[in-house]
Image: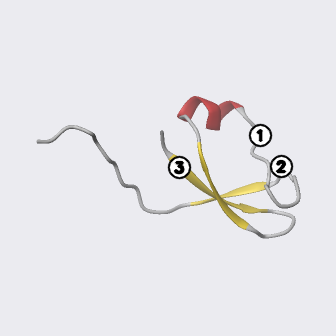
């Protein structure tokens, strides 16, 4: 599952959540510190981890 980085629009705390793409599209993201749903997406690098050996 992908991880998403956010910054709260109210308290400005940065946090990371792991959720499916469909959950990200349909759920409101809540700040773990103040509970606000005013989240700003922070764009960061992407990395993938597989369990198979190539």
Contact between labelled residues 3 and 1, with CB atoms less than 8 Å apart: no
Q: Residues within 10 Å of mark 2 (few under 14, many from 20)?
A: some
Q: Nearer the viewer, mark 1 or mark 3?
A: 3
Residue located at (49% from left, 63% from top)? 44
SS at mark 1 in the image: loop
The image shows residue 8 at horizontal and vertical percentages of: 78, 62
- Label for residue 37? 2
Q: Which one is nearer the viewer's eye here, 29 or 52?
A: 52
Residue 19, above or below 3 = above
- Label for residue 28? 1
Q: Residues within 10 Å of mark 3 (few under 14, many from 20)?
A: some
Query: Which residue, given by chain and number where applicable, does mark 3 sit on?
Result: 3
Residue located at (48% from left, 39% from top)? 1
Q: Marks 3 and 2, Cα distance to the nearest angstrom?
A: 18 Å
Q: Which one is nearer the viewer's eye here, 30 or 25?
A: 30
Position of 24 with respect to 45 (left or right) is right
């Amino acid at each position: 599952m992908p991880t998403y980085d956010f910054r709260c629009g109210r308290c400005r705390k940065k946090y990371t959540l792991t959720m499916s793409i469909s959950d990200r599209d349909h759920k409101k993201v809540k700040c773990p510190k103040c509970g606000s749903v005013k989240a700003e997406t922070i764009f960061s690098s992407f990395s993938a981890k597989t369990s198979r050996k190539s």
